[in-house]
Amino acid sequence: MRIIAALLAVVVLATCAPRPPTTTDPLVYDTSHAARATRAVIGIPGALSPVLVLEPLNRLEAPDRFVAFYRLPGFDGRSADEFVSFAFAAQHIAALVGKTGLKEIDLVGHSTGAAIALEAAKAIRRAHPDTKVQVVAISSALPAPQPVLAGIRGVAGTVRAAARAGSLNPRKVWLEYYRYLAYGPGAETNPQVADAADALVDANQSRITLPQEGLARRHTRDLRGWRNPDPQYLEGVDVTLYHGAVDPVFPPKAVARFARTLPQAELRLVEGHGHLLMLTFPEIWDYVGQDLSD
């Protein structure tokens, strides 16, 4: 089964394969707006996601603030042959700050994108200590060993999804697993939650696609070894973590432990929601807007 193979790749594949260089410019934004702005918001999607999932960030655009998005390999016109590199992403975002002379920058990341946002915040603080930095982490990925454990949980969840779907058809299994990702165990046991999960899948069928061959491995290789090095560079950076209280990928208890390792972090749990907060809890954008308001 293709979906199980993709999840197993996240768990099992070693990092011994040669890594092609990461060269594509990943950031997209209005350069003319950036030239006159003093602030920016950068959205960084999670693994296997396009920038479209963060499109509501465009509401935060203002005369002195532009919005940019970080494209992941295989999405939004970026080559699928490249790997997600935390170091490359952090350096590239920090270079944008130097290039545009930004006074303030807000980094909004989902899942793996949240981990990238934290690394970018450190890089900015090292290179441009006078720039104000803020991070909003939505359904944040966690340091090792949690990504490997998440992969194991994902494989188990996919097997259960296949049993519930009564099929080995990859798309049917993926759609069933998507329900579980969105709402956690309640999608399997609570009729009300199950109805909400069904409605979510029905509304997004055309946008839910199976991962390309090998893309999960290329998107998660850096994450599997990430340990949140040098957290002291986040001193002075306000970090807000929004997390589903029934997230089946990165458990809330583990997120709470992680938040305590950050100098200035606040964890806000959203009851009844899983890993796909941006879809199941669209109100999150109102909260993010308030966090990043003047």
Image (cartoon, rainbow, N blue to C red):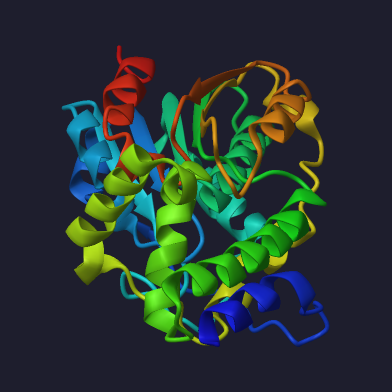
Asked if 121 appears above or below 143 in the picture, the reply is above
Asked if 174 appears above or below 177 in the picture, the reply is below
Q: Is residue 29 left or right of residue 277?
A: left
Quadrant (top left, top right, bottom left, bottom right) of the N terminus: bottom right
Q: How many marks?
A: 0
Locate residue 54, reporting x and y percent: 32, 46
Locate residue 116, reporting x and y percent: 59, 48
Q: Is residue 28 left or right of residue 81?
A: left
**Residue occupying image coordinates x 78% and y 76%:** 12
Q: Is residue 254 left or right of residue 164?
A: right
Quadrant (top left, top right, bottom left, bottom right) of the C terminus: top left
**Residue occupying image coordinates x 62% and y 73%:** 7
Nearer to us in this view, 147 or 39: 147
Asked if 210 appears above or below 224 in the picture, the reply is below
**Residue occupying image coordinates x 67% and y 36%:** 122
Locate residue 83, reporting x and y percent: 59, 74
Locate residue 57, reporting x and y percent: 27, 38
Asked if 190 appears above or below 258 in the picture, the reply is below
Q: Residue furthest top?
A: 294
Q: Is residue 99 visible?
A: no
Q: Is residue 180 visible?
A: yes
**Residue occupying image coordinates x 54% and y 36%:** 246
